[in-house]
Amino acid sequence: MKVLVVGNGGREHAIAWKLLQSKKITQVICIPGNGATAARSDCQNFYLRVDDFAGIARCALVNGSSLVVVGPEQPLALGITDYLRSQNLTVFGPTKEGAQIESSKSWAKALMQEAGIPTPRAAVFTNLEAAKAYLAAEGAPIVVKVDGLAAGKGVTVATTVQQAQDALADLFQNPHQKVVLEEFVPGQEVSILALTDGLTIRPLLPAQDHKRIGEGDTGANTGGMGAYCPAPIATPELMKRIQEKILEPTVAALQKRGIDYRGVLYAGLMITPQGEPKVLEFNCRFGDPETQAILPLLETPLEDLLLACTNQKLADFPPIEWKSGAAACVVVAAGGYPEAFRKGDAITGIEQAEALGAIVFQAGTHLKQRQLVTEGGRVLGVTGVGETLESAIAQAYAGVNCIQFEGMYCRRDIGSAGK
Ligand code: GLY
């Protein structure tokens, strides 16, 4: 069986890596892939844009791909699934309509409010004056969110009214902007990535992401600087509540709107100090870097799970099997990230890291005349797996310590909240 994976990040490398552990998978085709998938003999990269739907469809058909897995949100929001399905391809990932759960915060809020899903109070604005009046009444802290996709950078947690006003003034420079102002809810965040066939929904192990660039969760927001799994805050009792109060009602609400959603529903939750889960956001795809910490623990063949979703057979699927223990993924970024960052620096030490047992997922890398060089902001995700979270973290950092490239940066406190 051949599978085509759309995307070029650590998430997509982890998906390809996991699929290729199965004897059933003979080849993974990556569009566009990265330095890691370029180097594997059982992978083939095709350098097409992720929004070149006709090119991707041709590539899948010519190469006989039985399944297309879409990694990033942008092509989903643009309707890649609708197009590929119209070409009789089997696609894991929601349609354009379903992807609105991530591509429009206001659409997702309305769905949650209608379905009674616990989520912070919020209001949607299309002009600065109305937003400022609401802000004056609400005060700070408050959360300012861009309505559309913003690559993880569309959220400002304003601790003062002035900060919120500055964020609003900045956003409304775009006259077509839509902004959500949301109640600030304190607590601990957890990422629940669940697989759904549009009828049934099954969560994967809970994970926790580290979104800020600096240790102690300080500094600018990023796409994610590391993750660990399972996150102990999501106890079995809490997971049951999340299933009953959030995941199942969301699938029912999507169904009620006539949306055929087959893919990942990723619930970004805040667990309040009282232990209540509230949805901060939904994403319509696997999380990154969470996937790099979750998939190394998965025992069930990934392709079986993905096909159960695309064939609407998830209700009959046996319980998902997991390795015991934990995994931790440390993201190694290029100097300057998440602002302008360096590119083209030679990367060394991956083999040494792997010899210590770490799994090195590549993200912003490129194979240039046989030399692996940096190409993106998040360059590598180094994952350790162990019987305990401590041993997983130790293995991940032992791996990181082998890696070298000019200006490399990582947080040194990944997983500390889970210990
Ligand atoms: N780690 C956050 C995300 O995937 O959106």
Image (cartoon, rainbow, N blue to C red):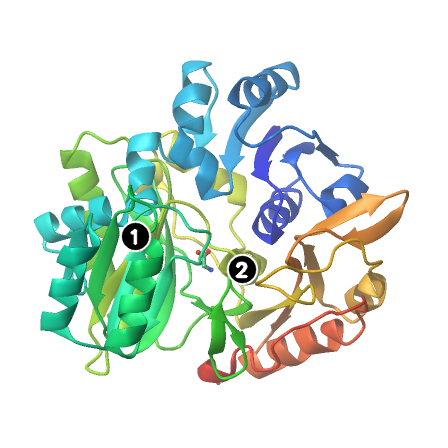
Q: Quadrant of ligand 1?
A: bottom left
The residue nearer to you, when weighing 307 against 260, is 260
Question: Which mark sits nearer the N-terminus, 2 or 1?
Answer: 1
Check the image and report above or below for 146 versus 65.
below
Amino acid at circle 1: Phe
Name the mark on residue 289: 2
Between the C-alphas of marks 2 and 1, the distance is 31 Å
Total marks in image = 2
Q: Which element carries disc 2, helix, strand or loop?
A: loop
> Which label lies toward us, 2 or 1?
1
Residue 250 makes an appearance in the image: yes
Residue 165 position within the rendered picture, expressed as x and y whole percent measured from the top left? 27, 67
Mark 2 residue CB less than 8 A from any atom of ligand 1: yes
Mark 1: give few (<14), some (14-19) or many (20+) Cα within 10 Å.
some
Residue 173 position within the rendered picture, expressed as x and y whole percent measured from the top left? 34, 51
**Label 1: which residue?**
172
Residue 244 makes an appearance in the image: no
